[in-house]
Structure formats: structure tokens, C-alpha cells
Image (cartoon, rainbow, N blue to C red):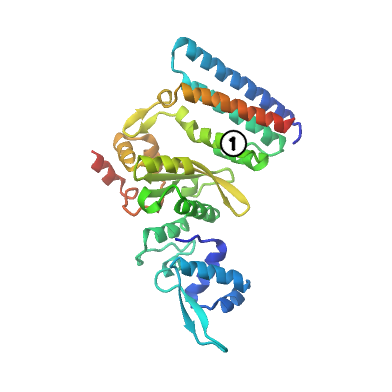
């Protein structure tokens, strides 16, 4: 992997985005407001920024579409199964943190789709992906 | 059920013309006898082909035939989609419909997905899967290099929905040298009906662009009927 300035910038950005997700988590815990979907949204953004660093370091173009970004990372980064599992899990749930729709006859809004456990899980997963990416780029 | 790889499709194409012995067919296709024999034997084991002994120079040879059942596939090579006069099983129709996807590059990807679905230990297609369709850019022929394959699956019940989501929610499908991501949205039949009745924006959007793969009960083909049933 090359030490592409774009890759370095993506890692820095991912680190800050994880911090912002943590800040929202802390605010939710302190205020009692269920801001878990916002933690998930920011956590997923951090994951995407982290994997974009690896794609950039591989001199590949970074796809705009979310699934293509994950797929390109798996192609160029050949991550271990547990990282791939994390990416696929959150890619699948990502859209639920963005859109309001009807599921099973009820209107589903992002803030009812995620709970504190999900928020804690994505913080942990984003940290894991970020560490993995940093180890790849070192 | 069987997987239709490119090599196997070549074998089936030749069998559409006439019956073949493994030796003659291998010579015709320019492939090894053992490779062709393996394809023929697997297709025979899966009930796709019939075989019979025919007289040959020294001793009887085995000749393979597509019989009546599989000729349907062969009338429907890509670009020649026509199932009008054939009585197909839903599984055979699924393969045929995959070949009807507008961009040929996705045929092998969706074939592979369908094969994985049918051979997955966690689900039984006949019992757990009510319907399967492709939607989005692959269904409408607007897919590019960065496109994933979007699949809508209607599951029989919540247990099947959970298993299908776990195994197929996001999956890399390897076909040839490339791997494409397949994203599967799973509904139970009940939640599909409820979503239609309640005006789900997702279902409203995708219903106009569904490319049916497997729909033996016609629930994707006749969503209005499903909506009425719910109301």
C-alpha cells in the first residue's frame, strides 16, 4: 500500500467521525434522548471513510455507491472474515438509519430502528475497522 | 435443480440439436471427454437428461438426451426469451427468467445467486421462499461496473425471513474473475402484503421495475391481488 495523502486524510476523517459518534452517544446517555440512529449513522460514515483510505492507498477509484465501496474494499484489501462480516452487517442495516418507510404495516422511522445496544456495537465495530485499516496502512 | 454454467450451457445447446454420446460431444465442443462426461452425468443425476444404450462399433455406447423436459431452456437462449408454449416448473422458469435479464453480464451472477439460494442448508426454496425478483439497475438494464444486484425475496414466515436475511442480506457473488455484491431485502408474505396495503414507498418504487425470477404463486406478478387480500 502506498502512503497516499488522500488515504491519510481519510483515516484522520474517520477518526474524527468516530469521535462525533461517541459524542452523540454520550449526549444520548446524559440527556436520556434516544439518539441511537444518529450514532449508527455517524458510525457507519466512519467505517466508510476508513475503508476508503485503503481503496485510495491502492490507487483505485473510490466508488460513490455504498455497496460498491464495500465490495471494492474487499477486492483490494482482502480483509479477514470478521471485518467482512462487520461491513456486510452494517451495510445491510445502513438504509434503516436513513429513511422512513412502512415495514409490516407500520411506519418505521430510523429512531425506532436502533437501540442503545446497536449504538454501542457500531462504536466498537467502527473502532475495530479503523484499527485494521491503520495496521494495513502502516 | 442444477447450475447452468457457461460450459454447461454449451453442452445443453448442443443437446438441443440432437442426442450425443460423451465422446462425440467432446469432439464437437473441443473439450476433454471426461469434462463433458462429468457435465452429462451430473445433469443426468439431477433428472435433467435421460440416457440410453445405443449400438456402436465395438460395444454399446451411452447416448444422452434432453428429452422433453429441458428443451424449454434451449428455446430461450439470451435474447430469445419465449416461454409461451411450455409447461415449465417454477425452478426451470427461474433459470429461463434469469437469462431474460437485459444485460448478459449479470446472467452468471444471478444464476450463481439462485444456485446458492437453492443449495443453502439454512433454507428450503420450495418451503421457505415464496418469491424472488431482481429490481434496480440490473433489472432495468442500467447497471454499470459499480452496481450491485438488488434482490427482493418474499419468505414464507418470520423464521425463514431471519435465515434468508442472515445468509443473503449482503453477499458477494463470485462469477468468473469478478465478485458482485448482492443486496437482498426480505419480507414475509404478511409484511409484504401489509407494506403494499400501507403504501410502502420502497415497494411502490420497486414494483414497477421488478424482474421476476421465482413466483410460483404469482404474488409479485399480481400485487393488487395481494393488496386486496390484506385489506
Location of the C terminus of chain B by quadrant is top left
Q: Which residue is label 1 attached to?
A: A82
Query: What element does badge 1 sit on?
Result: helix
* Residue B208 visible to the viewer: no
x and y, in percent, of residue A59 in the image: 72, 38
Residue at the spot x=67%, y=31% of the render? A133
Q: Residue at x 64, y 36 (%)?
A: A62
**Callout 1 crowding tier (Cα within 10 Å): few <14, some 14–19, many ≥20:** few
Q: Residue furthest right?
A: A2
Residue A70 in the image: state x and y as whole percent.
Answer: 59, 37
- Marker count (numbered): 1
Name the residue located 34 percent from the left edge and 54 percent from the top edge: B216
Residue B42 appears in the rendering: yes
Judge by depth and name the residue closer to the eye, A126 or A8: A126
Question: Residue farthest to the top?
Answer: A31
Q: Nearer the viewer, residue B37 or A2?
A: B37
Q: Chain of mark 1?
A: A
Q: Where does the N terminus of chain B fall, quadrant-wise?
A: bottom left
Residue sitting farthest toward the bottom: B57
Residue B165 rendering spot, x and y as whole percentages: 44, 40
- Horizontal side of residue B187 vs B18, given as left or right: left
Residue B221 falls left or right of residue A61: left
Tell me if residue A81 comes above or below residue B42 in the rendering.
Answer: above
In percent of width and height, residue B80 lies at 46, 64
Nearest the eye: A70 or B33: B33
Can you say whether A98 is above or below B215 in the image?
Answer: above
| Nearest to the observer: residue A23 or residue B204 | A23
Image quadrant where residue B30 sits: bottom right
Amino acid at each position: 500500500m502506498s502512503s497516499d495523502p488522500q488515504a491519510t486524510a481519510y483515516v484522520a476523517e474517520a477518526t474524527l467521525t468516530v469521535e462525533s459518534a461517541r459524542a452523540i452517544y454520550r449526549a444520548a446517555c446524559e440527556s436520556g434522548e434516544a439518539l441511537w440512529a444518529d450514532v449508527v449513522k455517524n458510525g457507519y460514515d466512519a467505517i466508510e471513510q476508513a475503508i476508503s483510505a485503503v481503496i485510495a492507498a491502492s490507487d483505485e477509484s473510490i466508488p460513490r455507491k455504498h455497496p460498491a465501496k464495500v465490495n471494492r474494499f474487499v477486492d483490494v484489501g482482502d480483509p479477514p472474515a470478521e471485518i467482512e462480516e462487520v461491513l456486510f452487517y452494517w451495510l445491510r442495516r445502513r438504509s434503516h438509519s436513513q429513511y422512513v418507510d412502512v415495514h409490516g404495516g407500520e411506519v418505521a422511522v430510523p429512531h425506532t430502528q436502533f437501540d442503545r445496544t446497536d449504538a454501542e456495537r457500531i462504536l466498537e465495530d467502527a473502532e475495530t475497522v479503523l484499527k485494521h485499516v491503520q495496521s494495513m496502512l502502516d | 435443480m442444477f447450475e447452468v454454467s457457461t460450459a454447461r450451457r454449451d453442452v445443453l445447446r448442443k443437446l438441443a440439436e440432437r442426442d450425443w454420446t460423451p465422446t462425440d460431444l467432446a469432439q464437437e465442443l473441443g473439450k476433454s471427454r471426461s469434462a463433458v462426461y462429468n457435465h452429462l452425468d451430473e445433469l443426468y443425476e439431477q433428472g435433467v437428461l435421460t440416457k440410453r444404450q445405443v449400438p456402436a462399433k465395438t460395444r454399446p455406447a451411452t447416448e444422452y438426451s434432453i428429452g422433453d423436459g429441458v428443451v424449454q431452456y434451449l428455446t430461450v437462449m439470451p435474447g430469445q426469451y419465449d416461454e409461451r408454449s411450455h409447461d415449465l416448473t417454477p425452478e426451470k422458469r427461474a433459470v429461463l427468467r434469469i437469462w431474460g435479464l437485459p444485460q448478459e453480464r449479470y446472467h452468471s451472477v444471478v444464476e450463481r445467486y439462485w444456485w446458492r439460494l437453492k443449495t443453502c442448508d439454512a433454507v428450503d426454496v420450495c418451503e421457505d421462499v415464496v418469491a424472488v425478483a431482481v429490481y434496480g439497475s440490473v433489472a432495468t438494464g442500467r447497471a454499470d461496473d459499480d452496481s450491485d444486484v438488488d434482490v427482493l425475496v418474499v419468505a414464507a414466515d418470520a423464521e425463514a425471513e431471519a435465515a434468508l436475511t442472515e445468509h443473503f442480506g449482503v453477499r458477494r457473488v463470485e462469477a468468473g474473475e469478478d465478485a458482485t455484491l448482492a443486496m437482498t431485502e426480505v419480507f414475509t408474505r404478511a409484511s409484504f402484503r401489509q407494506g403494499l396495503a400501507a403504501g410502502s414507498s420502497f415497494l411502490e418504487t420497486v414494483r414497477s421495475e421488478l424482474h421476476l425470477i421465482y413466483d410460483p404463486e404469482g404474488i409479485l406478478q399480481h400485487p393488487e391481488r395481494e393488496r386486496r387480500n390484506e385489506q
